[in-house]
Amino acid sequence: LLQNCVALNSSFSAVESDKCSVGAGTVMEHCRLSGSFSIGSNCLVSGIRGKWNCPLKIPNHFVCQIVKLQENWTDILGLPKGDKHESYVCIYHNIDDAIKKHSTCYGVSFQHLFLKSDLNSSDLWDDEKQQLLWNAKINPIFQDGYLDWSIFSWIENMTTPNSSVDESSKASLDKWKTHQRIALAQLRSVADASFEFSYRVDCQPIFKRRNEELNTDIAMFDKNALTLTWKALDNTIIHSIKNGSIDICSQAFMLTSTLLTNLSEVINMDKSAEIVFNRRDFITDLKSATKELQVNDFQKILLYRDRLLSNKPSRSDLLECAEAFEEAACQLTKLCVSTGVSVITKEARPQAGTWVLAEAPARVDLSGGWSDTPPLSYEFGGKVACLAVSVNKKKPLSARCRLVSPGSGILLTTESRNIDTDELVQSDSVHLKTVKDISDYNNPHASCALLKCALLIYGLLPTIDYNKGIENDGSSLQPFVDTFCRLDNVGLEIVSTSKLPKGSGLGSSSILAGCVLACIGKCLGLGFGEDQEDNDSLTKAILLLEQLLTTGGGWQDQVGGLYGGLKLGGLY
């Protein structure tokens, strides 16, 4: 039904799907479509609702919008009062028509239109001097939401080159000519904007089904409903994988987990179905995957669920399966966050021994907190208003990095200092000499874990799959350090400094991560975008770092600190 088009806040009820179609490139908003309809390609359709007496058909490249009129619209326009009805206007013209010019109407010149249809200027305008599409009376009025779409059927026929005018088109044109119509210029003063706004708001509970809590009451007690639910979720997973929509795939996995958990509450079996599934290998494969996922990558877990359900599973079986789907959903969210970040090598960098310093302010969250956090932000968007602030007229977060030549390994230090006196309050250091020394990068409580993740983000261990565990790898880290720094027999020293108390709520960890990434990049001639000062790419890299650190999180902290002043950050 919908192929390569956009449907916003709209619902469709097609009894016979073969009689319903929407063309590529079309955008539809705030519509309720039912019955038979055919909408062409590259159209803009808005607010279609009500009842109609014949199949709705909109040609390619047309605008069609229905707007409710105020009750006293005839008084406002100085027209004779009719019977008391709810009145709607249907705006209908070609998408390329120039509204404020006398050039085209329905995609053809006025001269062609008049010649083909026997219309004349008096049918469209009251004022002979101002003959623009803007004030042409071409928009029909309908009563009580009942739309007679046959009134438009003449337009496609009479605006198509070399087409002959048939009797049905003539009848449609006659109906159009005798129908009450208004111009766009008149609509501004009589449109019921308040009603239209309320209509759109009232429709949200209907249209936002995708965003509501999954209702499993029926599915849990109706085998057919349960089968249809699995099919819908599986189709969502398959289509989202094919389209590269990892966030949607993740949401479908989480909904599957929710349904399995709810089903476990009504299962009375005690004996296990004994269906074997190597969950650890499956998740490990996901961790090693790239964005180019294939449907086959997920067949194992879907088959595991289906086999389990067909063998009278116990409550513990279902809960274990639910946990596997939930873990996969979380990993897919991580994968979604991790895309779009690539390291670029720069030539310019300071000499060995020179400290590179990156400083940043703290941030104050004004509104919208948590709407920035995946997967919530991927499904709903998300906007956060925040403010970059100094503390006691100082930037409280910083990191510095330098090459040490000759040197060995990587010396990492995190320190906390007093904001007023700069006195050292607390510090922690670790000297990385072997590969296994960095293996606890994903433990937020480990020494200098954030700094370790920053090094991995930049590619310190490009040939080692550290997702599979490197805690027993005692090989020397030095060859990797030399390759990473593009120099022989060098060491690296990184120090992060916070002058904020832990848990201050001022975005310290994320902004500090930005400082660490920035100073390493500047010191080693690395970056995440064409411009080393590219804060957009740095913001994405911090998201990836926090996924690697297993703390997760959104983008509001780094946006708040990396961009100066008051700002509204959003995900689109």
Image: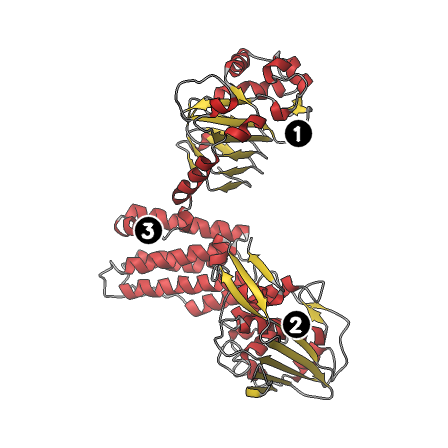
- Disc 2 is placed on an element classified as helix
Front one among 243 and 198: 198
Q: Are marks 1 and 2 in contact (CB under 8 Å)?
A: no
Residue 355 image point, x, y percent: 71, 81
Residue depth check, mark 1 versus mark 2: number of the one nearer the observer? 1
Q: Do the residues labelled 3 and 2 touch (CB within 8 Å)?
A: no
Disc 3 and disc 2: Cα gap in Å?
46 Å
Q: Residues within 10 Å of mark 2 (few under 14, many from 20)?
A: many
**Residue at 37% across, 51% down:** 230
Instruction: Name the residue that disc number 2 marks.
Output: 518
Q: Are marks 1 and 3 in contact (CB under 8 Å)?
A: no
Q: Can residue 392 be seen in this view?
A: yes
Instruction: Name the residue that disc number 1 marks.
Output: 98
Mark toward the start of the polypeptide (1 vs 3)? 1
**Residue at 51% across, 77% down:** 469
- Disc 3 is placed on an element classified as loop
Residue 264 image point, x, y percent: 28, 60
Q: What residue type is labelled 2?
A: Ala
Residue 369 image point, x, y percent: 48, 62
Front one among 339 and 268: 339
Q: Residues within 10 Å of mark 1 (few under 14, many from 20)?
A: some
Q: Which amino acid does label 1 sit on?
A: Ala
Disc 1 and disc 3: Cα gap in Å?
48 Å
Instruction: Name the residue that disc number 3 marks.
Output: 215
